[in-house]
Structure formats: C-alpha cells, structure tokens
Image: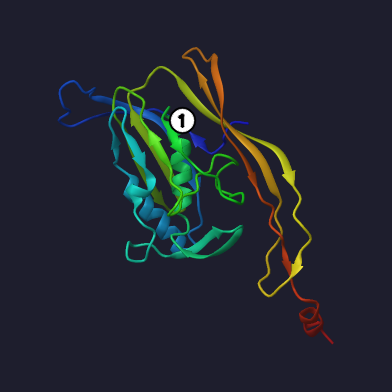
C-alpha cells in the first residue's frame, strides 16, 4: 500500500545570487506530513526544535547529511524537554522524546526525493505517526544519514505548527517519480496482561517491509527495491492488581 501520509505537489523558487554553474530554479521534489498532539507540551516543543534545526539545510551534489549532527545532542542544555521515549521496548520518560518523529518524516521525504539512505534504524515498537518500516529511530548511538547522489544541490525545509509536521525537499527534478510503500507481513499477538501499578493496554507487534518504487515520466514502474525488513515487538499490557480491584469494589 502506498504511504497515505505523503503529500505531493510542485512549486518553483529561485535562488538569490546563485553561483555560476549552479541551476537557479528549484522545485518541490517531495513533501511528507505527519501529525502530533500538542497536549504533551514537552514532546511538541522537541518536535518544533528539531524541525527548526534541519530546516534550511542544503546538501550539495554528492554530499552527506547526519541528522544527529544537524539537531545536536538531546539534552536540556541543548534546549530539549522531557517527553516519553522508547527504551528497551518500553515507553519511559526521557529528554528529547518526539525527535524521532522528525527524523522519520525526513526519512520518508528523502526517499521520495530520490536521496540515498546511508543509515536508518527502526524503533523496537510500532509508532503511530508513520507506517511500519518507514520510521527512523535516532539516539546517541543511532543516526539517520542521507546522501545526495544528484549533480545539483537539494534543500530541506521543515515546519511544525498546530500539531502538523511537514518536511519538504527542494531541488532540480531528474525526470523520475519516487514512491514509498509499507507492507505488513505478520501481526504478533501481545502476551497476556500482567498485574502492575502503572496501567497500560497491550499492543500487537508487527513484521513489515518497506519498498521504494521508481516510476518513469510515463508512469511505468522502473524498479521496486526493498528498503528494510523489520520486526516490532508486541507490548504486554498491565492490568490492576486483584487486591486493588477488591478495595475499589463498591459496597
């Protein structure tokens, strides 16, 4: 199935004072939009900050890009807030939660723009804002790295506002159309819920693959290449302890 969150369009801009030999006209190559909740203020602030830090970056021809280098360490000193992060298959408080939504949205936009992916990693659990195997988890030890194989520069633009995150890539079109695809191969049943103090619902896991489909100007399929195959672990639910239920039982 084609990634439903992707939005495509075209626009034309002109570089001011472009250097000699560099194409002056740039067009929208891809645009990806994902949504987030403003209710978690820390997470929303982290998304906005990460989007600001990648926005406006230009990759020259055959230049590489590191998300971690562009965004910087996820620390309070670097402007990030506490918000839930996935750690060892659990959602736990951590500084910088939400940044992975920016890296995942950029990952899809880069693929749709014909950029190459040098490094990407899945989350250990499925995420709700992007289809399976099209996420890009980042941490101190895991990066999202891109490479511009084109003979002309590309520019990244990102904006997060009112619960909507949009990442666009601009450059000179190469005559090809790039589309991503996510396929769920299997669903993994969640184990029976256990008792605990912090309640949460169980969640099934997934086995999935993602593909990059390349089309010619006439719409003919040129290639369909697998990007990744991933396994996302199921989440065990936590239910109230039986003693707690008895204590709360009305007389």
Asked whether residue 188 appears in the rendered view, the answer is yes
Pick the front one: 217 or 61? 61
Residue, x 48% and y 15% (percent of image)? 216
Q: Quadrant of residue 9?
A: top left
Pick the front one: 115 or 11? 115
Which residue in the structure is indicated by mark 1?
112
Residue, x 73% and y 40% (percent of image)? 186
Q: On the rendered image, what quadrant is the N terminus found in?
A: top right
Could you say whether the residue bearing mark 1 is in a helix, strand or loop? helix
User: Would residue 71 be found to the left or right of residue 221 on screen?
Assistant: left
Asked whether residue 11 appears in the rendered view, the answer is no
Residue, x 32% and y 49% (percent of image)? 53
Q: Quadrant of residue 42?
A: bottom left
Residue projecting furthest to the right:
251
Mark 1, Cα crowd under 10 Å, few <14 / some 14-19 / many 20+, is: many
Q: Quadrant of residue 106?
A: top left
x%, y% of residue 171?
Answer: 32, 28
């Amino acid at each position: 199935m084609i990634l439903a969150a992707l939005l495509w369009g075209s626009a034309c801009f002109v570089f001011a004072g472009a250097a000699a030999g560099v194409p002056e006209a740039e067009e929208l190559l891809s645009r990806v939009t994902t949504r987030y909740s403003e209710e978690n203020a820390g997470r929303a602030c982290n998304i906005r900050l990460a989007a600001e830090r990648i926005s406006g970056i230009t990759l020259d021809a055959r230049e590489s890009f590191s998300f971690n280098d562009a965004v910087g360490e996820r620390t309070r000193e670097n402007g990030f807030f506490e918000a839930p992060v996935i750690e060892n298959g659990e959602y736990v408080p951590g500084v910088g939660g939400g940044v992975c939504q920016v890296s995942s949205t950029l990952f899809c936009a880069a693929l749709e723009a014909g950029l190459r992916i040098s490094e990407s990693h899945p989350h250990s659990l499925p995420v709700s804002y992007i289809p399976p195997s099209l996420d890009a988890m980042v941490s101190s030890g895991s990066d999202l790295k891109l490479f511009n194989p084109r003979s002309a520069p590309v520019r990244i633009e990102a904006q997060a506002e009112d619960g909507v995150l949009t990442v666009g890539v601009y450059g000179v079109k190469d005559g090809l159309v790039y589309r991503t695809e996510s396929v769920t191969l299997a669903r993994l049943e969640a184990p029976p819920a256990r008792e605990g103090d912090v309640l949460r619902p169980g969640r099934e896991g997934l086995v999935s693959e993602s593909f990059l489909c390349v089309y010619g100007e006439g719409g003919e399929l040129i290639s369909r290449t697998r990007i990744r195959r991933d396994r996302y672990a199921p989440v065990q639910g936590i239910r109230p302890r039986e003693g707690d239920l008895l204590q709360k039982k009305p007389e």
